[in-house]
Each structure stands twice: as structure tokens, then as C-alpha cells.
């Protein structure tokens, strides 16, 4: 058609170059399903709550801090990151002492950090934990 300009080679190449870049935003947002780029474990000691919140033989999930704390029958505490080791999702469900990942259904024992159900194959990251002045404090492993 005589009155209609055709696209220049530069216009076509510019459009082709921008197409893959536009998809990067989507890929970045669809990543770990809840990891959100936050560290998998606290980078400094963090106060989680009252020591009385974790009963003997039980566990408590501290979602905001991404930490789960359990107490054995002898009263000792253990803490783990509540970021799934499979895809980096933040675990938001504690059923008794079993953590359930919302992304792919991996399950972990809150008392040991061990995998109970795949697809995760690696245990949760252990954290140091102690009771200080009636509060539970967790932090990076020393």
C-alpha cells in the first residue's frame, strides 16, 4: 500500500529486544511463592514471645519472624527456620508438631526439622534458641 509506511528494521528490532525484558517482572514475582526475598533465618537474635507459649511436647509457629520453636518433654527448646527448603516458601501452618508448606505440600517435624513428606528433601535450618527473662529468643546458629 503506497500511503502506509512500513516498520523500519530498527522498530522491529527494538520491539523484539523489549519483549523478553517485559517477562522478567512476571518471573521475579512468581518465584518461591512466599519467600519474598526475606532471609530464611533471622540474621540477629529476635524475641519471639513468652516462654510459656510453647508447652512441653508442643510447638509454636512465629510466622512474622519465620521461626518455629518446639519444647521437648524435658523442657529444652529447639528452633528452626520456617522457610521450606524445597522452594523457599514461608510455611504458615502448624498441625500439632507438623509444619505444612502451602506451596507444594512438604511437611516437616517441628521438633527435629526433619522432612516428613516430599517434595522437600533437606531439613529445616536450625537456629539457636534460649529463654531469657521469660521470653524466647532465637537467632542464627553459632
Image (spheres, rainbow, N blue to C red):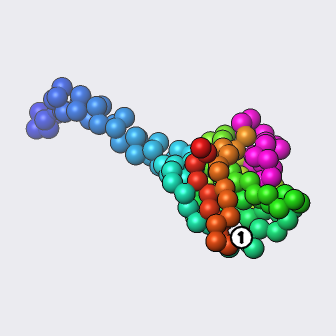
State the quadrant of the C terminus.
top right
- Helix, strand or loop at mark 1: helix
Q: Which residues are magenta?
A: 105-122
Q: Is residue 12 above or below residue 110?
A: above
Residue occupying the far left of the picture: 3
Q: Position of residue 34 (x, y in %)?
A: 57, 53
As drawn, the residue found furthest toward the top would be 9
Q: Quadrant of residue 20?
A: top left
Q: Position of residue 124 (x, y in %)?
A: 70, 44
Circle 1 residue: 51
Label total for image: 1
Q: Residue at x 78, y 53 (%)?
A: 110
Towards the viewer: 137 or 85: 137
- Is residue 104 shown to the viewer in this render? yes
Mark 1 is surrounded, within 10 Å at the Cα level, by few (under 14), some (14 to 19) or many (20 or more) other residues, namely some
Residue at 64% from the left image edge and 71% from the top image edge: 133
In the displayed structure, would residue 10 be above or below residue 119? above
- Viewer can see residue 68: no
Left or right of 121: which side holds 49? left
Residue 9 at x, y percent in the picture: 18, 26
Q: Is residue 103 magenta?
A: no
Question: Quick check: 132 above or below 106?
Answer: below
Q: Is residue 98 left or right of residue 2?
A: right
Query: In which quadrant of the rendered image does the N terminus lie?
Result: top left
Residue at 30%, 31% in the rendered image: 16
Nearer-the-camera pick, 15 or 125 = 125
58 displayed left or right of 83? right
Look at the magenta stretch and give its main secondary structure. loop
Amino acid at each position: 500500500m503506497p500511503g502506509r509506511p512500513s516498520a523500519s528494521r530498527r522498530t522491529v528490532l527494538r520491539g523484539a529486544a523489549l519483549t523478553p525484558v517485559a517477562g522478567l517482572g512476571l518471573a521475579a514475582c512468581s518465584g518461591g511463592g512466599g519467600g519474598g526475598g526475606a532471609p530464611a533465618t533471622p540474621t540477629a537474635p529476635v524475641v519471639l514471645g513468652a516462654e510459656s507459649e510453647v508447652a512441653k511436647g508442643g510447638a509454636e509457629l512465629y510466622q512474622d519472624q519465620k521461626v518455629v520453636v518446639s519444647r521437648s518433654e524435658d523442657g529444652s527448646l529447639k528452633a528452626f527456620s520456617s522457610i521450606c527448603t524445597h522452594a523457599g516458601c514461608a510455611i504458615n501452618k502448624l498441625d500439632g508438631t507438623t509444619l505444612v508448606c502451602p506451596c507444594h505440600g512438604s511437611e516437616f517435624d517441628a521438633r527435629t526439622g526433619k522432612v516428613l513428606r516430599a517434595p522437600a528433601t533437606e531439613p529445616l535450618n536450625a537456629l539457636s534458641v534460649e529463654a531469657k527473662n521469660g521470653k524466647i529468643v532465637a537467632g542464627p546458629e553459632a
